[in-house]
Image: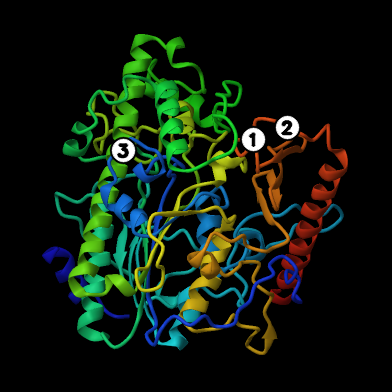
Amino acid sequence: MAHVADQFRQSPISVALITSAICIASFTRIAVGAEQPNFLIILADDLGYSDFGCYGGEISTPNIDALASRGLRYSQFYNTARCWPTRAALLTGYYAQQVRRDALPVVKGKKKCRATKNSRPPWARLLPKLLQPLGYRCYHSGKWHVDGQPLENGFDHSYLLYSHDTFFAPMTHTLDGEQVSSNDDYYATTAVADYAIEFLRQHREQASDQPFFEFVAFTAPHFPLHALPQDIARYDSAYNIGWDEVREQRWQRLRQMHSIPGTLSRLEPEIGTPYTRHFDNAKQVLGPGEVNAEVAWESLTEEQRKFQAMKMSIHAAMIDRMDREVGRIVEDLRQSGELDDTVIVILSDNGASAEIMVRGNGHDPDASPGSAASYLCLGAGWSSAANTPFRRHKTWVHEGGIATPMIVHWPNGISAQGEWRSAAGHVIDIAPTVVQLAGGTWPQLHNDKEVPSTPGCNLAATFASDVPIERQAIWWLHEGNRAIRAGNWKLVAAKNEPWQLYDLSCDRTETNDLASRQPERTAELAQTWQSLTDEFILLRDRDSTQSE
């Protein structure tokens, strides 16, 4: 920690309301006491629904589990299926497509719009810009993957980890925009926590009379599978039982914790991963132990089973270490007396990934698995286990890609302890909830121009009781995969596939497609999806025209 503190001290300080019908929510300020709460948002990367112990997993996560036991767990919380659109949605309160951070269809007959995954329009400010006028100091540590830089978007200090292809000795990482060096024992997950803790300590020294907002974005357990040897050793041979058995065990534990309607989803060997072009190249380096499909464990060769079990041990070790680092941050808040009035939110940017590729400095087959010279990915079989009980993976908008844990801990604001919430929430809800709890209101104007209504809803009502969030629908589109959820009905389709219809009240795991039996409902939901898509296209084109 001293090394981090020294680096810190040496660094310079540097539409129309088209979506108003989507969310029916009150933005009247909720009485939260005389003091504004602090906020700590902790974001994991490629974490599966059942990877935490408090969501049925076998991985040791006692610190996160303790927060869940003293707070709330959400069983139907959604993201965008991918890292960068989720981060944009979380920090802006809008769908990524509304703020130019993910693609929308190109309308035939029109020139391709430049506003696709480019910089946000001026009205789409990040949370810190909304919190600064309310007196907050804001801090960021970890992955960014948003356009612009943290300091220019309202963060007072930022440790930014640019290198995503290694957890050891990154080539590029900065403190307040200035490159920093790595010592020999650098490990990304620990470093992210180190800087997060240092920012909190600096806050107490320099701005103790102000509330804080801290965004901690771990890169774990995203590939490459890199972990500390002592962490891997704790899971040695733990996964020799295979992903079939792990899925079944997680499902049984999860059912004992909370009622999830439906049956355990089936393996889909025909799906594998959408990144077959990457796998075809990577397999030559990774060798015969690698597998690119969701197949029965018993169908694997002995060499494949050994290789696959080893990979899951590293994945578990990465999550175990992240939990330990979360524990250090929480203990720092406890020691300072700030824990009880800090709203802690833990979530993931998407579900576990089926991707298999080799990037960065490549993969040395002779290197110790999990070390800096290795480059391994989780793959489809274990991704299915991580996403238990749901289907498919990151990038898809079936439940496996978009449904992940969310834990909220706030002793001074939430009296319930260890309860579950079934309200269907989405990362677009985080920003309006934070603004509301901080004592603010959602902006209607920016630079004298009208700001579109946020499609996000205030989650605060669900803190007190398990009430539904009233909204028209939740909408998804990513790389041709599309979905919409209205109430308990979900319409979903993978790229170039027909619509599927599921009643999530009795089939959360999407195993019984009702589209052919309920054509009218299917058509109605498809029209709602298209109407929202058309509105977002109009907004995109309007903003693009104004910026040209």
In the image, residue 75 sits, relative to residue 193, either above or below, namely above
- Of residue 221 and residue 415, the one placed in the foreground of this image is 415
* Spatial separation of the CA atoms under disc 1 and disc 3: 26 Å
Dot 1 or dot 3, earlier in sequence = 3
At a point 27% along the width and 26% down the height, the residue shown is 238
Dot 3 or dot 2, earlier in sequence = 3
- Of residue 325 and residue 304, the one placed in the foreground of this image is 325
Instruction: Specify whether 494 is left or right of 176.
Output: right
At a point 38% along the width and 78% down the height, the residue shown is 37
| Residue 163 drawn at (x, y percent) | 35, 52
Mark 2: amino acid: Asp
Q: Which residue is mark 3?
A: 59
Pointer 2 local density, CA inside 10 Å: few below 14, some 14–19, many at least 20:
some
Q: Would you say the residues marked 1 and 3 are in contact, meaning their CB atoms lie under 8 Å apart?
A: no
At a point 39% along the width and 15% down the height, the residue shown is 288
Q: Residue furthest left?
A: 2
Pointer 3 local density, CA inside 10 Å: few below 14, some 14–19, many at least 20:
many
In the image, residue 236 sits, relative to residue 429, either above or below, namely above
Query: Secondary structure under badge 3?
Result: loop
Q: Which residue is mark 2?
A: 513
Q: Which residue is mark 1?
A: 510
